Image (cartoon, rainbow, N blue to C red):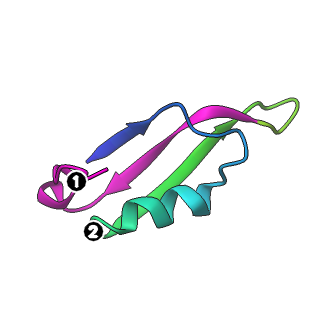
C-alpha cells in the first residue's frame, strides 16, 4: 500500500519517515520529496508498506 504523508517538518528526512511508520509494520520504502533545484524538502512524502492490514491500522496519536 502506498501512503501519502503530508505536513511534514521541512527537517524530516526519508529515514525519519521510515522510522515513524515502522511502528505499525514493515516499510518497503519511504521517501521525502525534495525540490530538484534546492534539494530542500517540499513537506510531504510517500511510504510503501507491503502488508495492507498493517498499513490500515489506526494511529493512536
Residue at the right extreme, as displayed: 38
Q: Residue at x 18, y 61 (%)?
A: 54
Q: Is residue 59 left or right of residue 17?
A: left
Mark 1–mark 2 Cα distance, whole angstroms, equals 7 Å
Give the percent coordinates (x, y) of residue 19: 49, 66
The one nearer the camera, 27 or 16, is 16
Residue 41 position within the rendered picture, expressed as x and y whole percent measured from the top left: 72, 37
Up/down of 23 relative to 2, above or below: below
| Mark 1 secondary-structure assignment | helix
Q: How many labels, in total?
A: 2
Reading the image, the residue beneath label 1 is: 55
Is 18 situated left or right of 42 in this image? left
Q: Residues within 10 Å of mark 2 (few under 14, many from 20)?
A: some
Q: Tell me the tag on residue 25.
A: 2
Magenta residues span 41-61
Residue 54, above or below 32: below
Q: Secondary structure at mark 2?
A: loop
Rendered view: 27 above or below 36: below
Camera-side residue: 15 or 60? 60
Name the quadrant containing residue 43.
Answer: top right
* Relative depth, front residue between 15 and 58: 58
**Dots 1 and 2: beta carbons under 8 Å?**
yes
Q: Residue furthest front?
A: 61
The spot of residue 31 in percent (x, y) is: 56, 50
Label 1 environment density (alpha carbons within 10 Å; few <14, some 14–19, many ≥20): many
x and y, in percent, of residue 36 in the image: 79, 32
Residue in view at x 19 percent, y 62 percent? 51
Residue at x-position 60% and y-position 63%: 15
Amino acid at each position: 500500500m502506498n501512503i501519502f504523508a503530508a505536513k511534514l517538518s521541512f527537517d524530516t528526512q526519508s529515514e525519519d519517515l521510515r522510522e515513524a511508520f515502522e511502528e505499525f509494520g514493515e516499510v518497503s520504502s519511504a521517501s521525502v520529496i525534495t525540490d530538484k533545484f534546492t534539494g530542500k524538502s517540499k513537506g510531504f512524502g510517500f511510504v510503501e508498506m507491503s502488508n495492507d492490514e498493517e498499513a490500515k491500522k489506526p494511529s493512536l496519536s
